[in-house]
Amino acid sequence: MPAPNRDIIVVGASAGGLEPLRLLLVDLPADLPAAVFVVLHVGETSQLTHILDQAGALPVAAAENGGAIERGQVYVAPPGKHLLLHDDHMLLRRGPRENFARPAIDPLFRSAAASFGGRVIGVVLSGALSDGTAGLRAIRRCGGVAVVQDPDDALVPTMPRSALRYADVDRVVPVARMASLLGTLSRQEPGPTPDIPLGIRLEAAIAAQESGDMQMNDMLGKLSRFSCPECHGTLWEIDDGIMLHYRCHVGHAYTADSVLASQTEEIDRLLGTLLRSHQERAALAQRMAEKERAGGRERLANQFEQRAGEYAQDAEVVKSLLRNGEAGNDMITNGSLRSSLLHEEER
């Protein structure tokens, strides 16, 4: 029998997302006729469930593998596992990371769309890069509703902006108005659920570790020239309309800007190594010059000093590249995302 209302709310957040999550739960009504599922990018340990349980009237619990879904309950993805929905219960899987995160937002959103179609409300809050955008697109394609925090209201607006650009969002509101909106939407009759696209079902199965190999990736998209930032295998480019996203045969998945951010970090790492090498060469050549001069070998000393100067100039060129890269790079990378989140949870 079809559900009389939209009774599945999935919420994703990342950097800067803890406070909006807390404020959202403060305002959600105690009689909310829906179950709420939360993914926040966290590290190996997290007090998120405890923090959110003190926020509002709805009870909050860590999601459990195989646990039944109950309305009026908030379920939080635990560290190190994707939270997925399947029929009337939850799954926890240590599947491949998506957008460098586990738990990640896209697997939850995608699995909710595949199982519940038009009954789903997807919510993207503050965060870096674009986890949640592909999942929100899946929710819309399966008949659900997409809600995004107003980027001007978000501490880190990159995730909301990505969703607005690619996901055909239904509503954009500040967090102060979001609980009221979700209360209204959850009491409405869901729209019709279309046939679930094969690609969404396949990607949901990969996250659930039910399947995943090169043959399945061939069904999802086509081989690209790019390599997986984590396992360095080939990436398949997934056919997802105007949005580029990728998946390797291991199952790691990324949006295009996540791949770009990873490449930026790799370039910074290589430049840092190169800078250190040039500085050490300059210091060693200078030390050799001093040794030769102390022994009265002035010609050799001058040659080593010349080399030291050249190496120092090379170091300055690399240092300039690093400075220019930092000045022109406005993306928050995964490393800074984790640092921001850990700082928030310690407060």
Image (cartoon, helix red, strand yellow):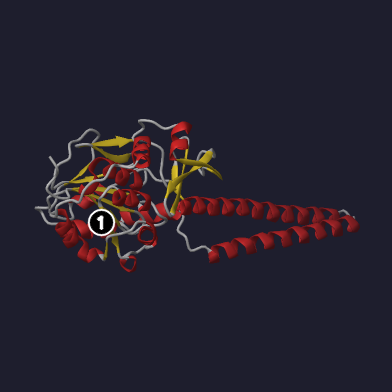
Query: Measuring 50% from the left and 50% from the top, which residue is drawn there?
Result: 259
Position of 294 with respect to 283 (left or right) is right
Position of 335 with respect to 280 (left or right) is left
Density class for disc 1 (Cα within 10 Å; few <14, some 14-19, many ≥20) is: many
Q: Nearer the viewer, residue 88 or 316?
A: 88
In the displayed image of the protein, which residue is found farthest to the bottom? 152
Res. 55 image quadrant: bottom left
Query: Measuring 73% from the left and 56% from the top, which residue is drawn there?
Result: 282
Q: Position of residue 281 (x, y in %)?
A: 73, 52
Q: Position of residue 228 (x, y in %)?
A: 51, 42
Compared with 59, 214 (above or below) is above
Query: Measuring 22% from the left and 36% from the top, which residue is drawn there?
Result: 87
| Three-letter residue code for mark 1 | Leu
Q: Position of residue 20 (x, y in %)?
A: 26, 60
Residue 5 visible in image: yes
Q: Position of residue 56 (x, y in %)?
A: 15, 55
Q: In what element is the residue under mark 1?
A: helix
Query: Measuring 30% from the left and 47% from the top, which residue is drawn there?
Result: 109
In the displayed image of the protein, which residue is found farthest to the left? 31
- Residue that numbered label 1 is attached to: 21
Quarter of the picture containing the N terminus is top left
Quarter of the picture containing the C terminus is bottom left
> In the rendered picture of this protein, how many numbered marks are placed on residues?
1
Residue 80 visible in image: no
Q: Nearer the viewer, residue 39 or 271?
A: 39
